[in-house]
Image (cartoon, grey):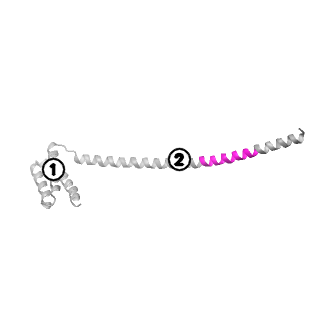
Amino acid sequence: MTNSQTIEKLNEGLIQLIDAYEKLQEKNEKLEENIKELEAKNSDLEYKLSDFNDNSEKQDSKMDGMLSKIQSLLSTPSSVKTTAENDVIDNISEENDSEEENEDNSLDSILDIKLDDNDDNAESTNKIDLGRMESLLNGLNNR
């Protein structure tokens, strides 16, 4: 083998090596672009998840606040009030079963009877709660 043949073989090997290197570089660039796209998607999804969690926490907080308000409205300081409210609720459910009968007078008569049965102190506290219940039930009757 002569020097020119050796140089020719080395040149061919070098050309093949350079071609392979260029192909690897192209693949590497594509992979880097793919990584950047995936990182962008990942950060976008993390932002959306964070936003979703924030909204969920806010909604949970609002729901807890509303539930605590409802509980405080429904909680009673005495068993007399609870019994009166339960009687009102029972009478109202019976009224809903027979809505067509005495629709205008039944709620007022129930409220009047319950207010007359309680003493003056319980009467003033029941007026507030029964008034609230009446407004809520009026909304249900309008359906």
Residue at the image position 47 percent from the left and 50 percent from the top:
48
The image shows residue 15 at horizontal and vertical percentages of: 78, 45
Residue at image mark 2: 42
Residue 124 is at least partly visible in this image: no
In primary-sequence order, the first of circles 2 and 1 is 2
Q: Is the magenta stretch mostly helix, strand or loop?
A: helix
Residue 78, x across and y down, in percent: 16, 43
Disc 2 to disc 1, C-alpha distance? 55 Å
Q: Locate residue 14: give its quadrant.
A: top right
45 part of magenta stretch: no
Helix, strand or loop at label 1? It is: helix
Q: Which of 63 and 2 is in front in this view?
A: 2
Q: What stretch is highlighted in magenta?
A: 18-35
Q: What residue type is labelled 2?
A: Asn
Closer to us: 103 or 63 = 103
Quadrant of the drawing holding the C terminus: bottom left
Residue under the point 20% across and 53% down: 133
Residue closest to the far right? 2
Q: Quadrant of residue 131?
A: bottom left
Instruction: Write the residue at 16% across / 46% down.
Output: 81
- SS under mark 2: helix
Left or right placement of residue 76 versus residue 116 in this view: right
- Neighbour tally class for label 2: few under 14, some 14-19, many 20 plus, Cα within 10 Å: few
Q: Which mark is residue 102?
A: none
From where the camera sits, is residue 20 visible? yes
Q: Read off the residue under disc 1.
A: 90
Q: Which of 10 and 108 is in front in this view?
A: 10
The residue drawn where x is 22% and y is 47% is: 74
The amino acid sitting under disc 1 is Asp
| Relative horizontal placement of residue 65, taking residue 36 as reference (left or right) | left
Which percent across, then down, holds residue 97? 16, 55
